[in-house]
Amino acid sequence: MAAEAATGSELVQVVALLTAGVVAVPIFRRMGLGSILGYLAAGLVIGPFGLAVFSEAEAILHVAELGVVMFLFIIGLEMQPSRLWGLRREIFGLGAMQVGVCALLLTGVGVIGGFPVAVSFVAGAGFVLTSTAIVMQILEERGDVSTPRGQRIVSILLFEDLAIVPLLALVAFLAPAGEEITVSERLVGVAIGVASIVSLVVAGRYLLNPLFRMLADSRAREVMTAAALLVVLGSALAMQLSGLSMAMGAFLAGVMLSESTFRHQLEADIEPFRGILLGLFFMAVGMSLDLTVVAANWRTVAICVAAYMVMKAVGIYAVARWRSSHRDALERAVVMAQGGEFAFVLYSAAASVGIIDGEANAILTAIIIVSMILTPFAIAVLRAVTPKDEQTLEGVDIASGLNGSVLIIGFGRFGQIVSQPLLLRGVDVSIIDNDVEMIQAAADFGFKVYYGDGTRLDILHAAGAGRARAVLICVDKAEAAVRIAENLKEEFPLVPVLARAYDRGAAIGLMNVGVDYQIRETFESALLFGGATLEKLGVDQAEVAEVIEDVRRRDAERLELQISGGLQAGRRLMKGNIPEPTPTPLTPPRRPGQAMNEGAADALGGRTAPAGEGA
């Protein structure tokens, strides 16, 4: 009975975890606050200080840390050794500079607050270690992991993971009994860490690929999944036993497998575990927030959170401005201004050697968690107050006084192809677009494109639309194409307007405006593609041409019906892949039909009429 009750209680906890995440995350994402804050809030609700479904958040946190480990493994899979080597300056230059500057500033905050130097250093150093889980999740949601600014942040995070080793050594040195630890013992610890990294690199280089090749030959999918988990967790365990970060071990394993032919298979196997465990990690962090400590020391917590986040952001911004723009530096400062999960390890070590007591450990842990919770809010505020990126027009000419025979509005992939027959025929073409990067790229290929927004009447006048013999609308967006066509037809009714339509709806809109010609961008290419397929299937070319012409006729007839009847009109003209029912007799005839006269006999293929019935 006791076993059944325990099992039922554990099942309730599992259901509560899943329910909290499923409910909270969509709500917070819809509110624009991100999934991280949703997980944190869900954990707070079901934790010891909410509904108390869980009483020991630490146990869940230890398991959930594997989500961070798997996350770093997948990041490693995306980063080849050559790419990682290319980031060495960012890792050991930018990373070391940020950690050093921020540690100095945050230690100063503690000293100014009246705390001893050792306590101030431990508290500040813990806050320096940014939350890898939060920052990487933010970068992934934005799609910035592979961008230059994202790579700089990843490099700094990697150095911070490495920094946990010397920081733990400093904690041991600053301990009241620190003199009992000899220099040789410290050197042995460093040697063990270096040897572990080298061993992992060698194993990844020479053992992992043969292992996965052998397992792939067995064609047992579940064994491949188990092997992927073994590699991730085994690497993490090896690094942990040597005194390094578990996440660092998983990351190195991912890097070693990044050039393997099994990379995509490994990523697919690990991804489901990574997503669930990472969400569980954030929920466990929310559960770990001790509200009694926060309530009893709310002034200290509030002041320290504000002071640490502000000073860390100042340090990050100062370092970032060395090689980044103001906007990138400000964004990095806000994204990385929180403390991280490795601070829990550092504070626990400091408490175990007597640098801080249990109450100080609880307060510092609460400060870290509150800073993690505030990060999504800080990012939302930054987005609200920061103006959107404005395109610089340096080196770009504004459309003014153009006199081309043909004006092309929009010079993407469609407009570029359209321009070729005109230019080969010697037609004088003027081109405008509102994408500065595209204009600059086009110049490298010999095109003079002017900057201008075709939806504005003044730009159309300046671009010579009234003097052109034809205007071609080749923009990507359907709404913009219709708007440009409206302006052209109202302002220059005698100028022929030819337009690219994104889809049938856009084509109907352009026809209602009165363009002289419109074509759906994929229509003709799709017909050619379908015709080529029929030829590959052995259909005669003449029959293919006949079928394609029938499709074109049906489409034109359907489009005419849709102009007046809406998009659902003319559905009968489309050929679907659901078989149409064929009427059949309810019961088969007892005998074959017979002709009753000579005309019927001819229709039935020559069957003769019964004698005496021909007349």
Image (cartoon, rainbow, N blue to C red):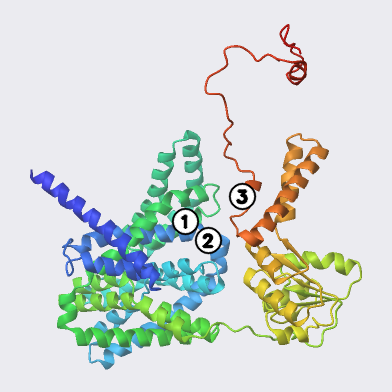
Q: Nearer the viewer, mark 1 or mark 3?
A: 3
Residue at the image point whose x is 72% and y is 11% from the top: 613
Q: CA distance from mark 2 to mark 3?
A: 50 Å
Q: CA distance from mark 1 to mark 3?
A: 52 Å
Q: Amino acid at mark 3?
A: Arg
Q: Which residue is mark 1?
A: 254
Q: Amino acid at mark 1?
A: Gly
Q: Secondary structure at mark 2?
A: loop
Q: Position of residue 299 (x, y in %)?
A: 21, 87
The part of the image, by quadrant, that contains residue 567 is bottom right
- The quarter of the picture where the C terminus appears is top right
Asked whether the viewer can see residue 41, the reply is yes
Q: Position of residue 113 (x, y in %)?
A: 25, 91
Q: CA distance from mark 2 to mark 1?
A: 8 Å
Q: Secondary structure at mark 1?
A: helix
Q: Amino acid at mark 2?
A: Met
Of residues 470 and 372, the one nearer the viewer is 470
Q: Position of residue 588 (x, y in %)?
A: 56, 18
Sequence-earlier tag: 2 or 3: 2
Label ID, residue 79: 2
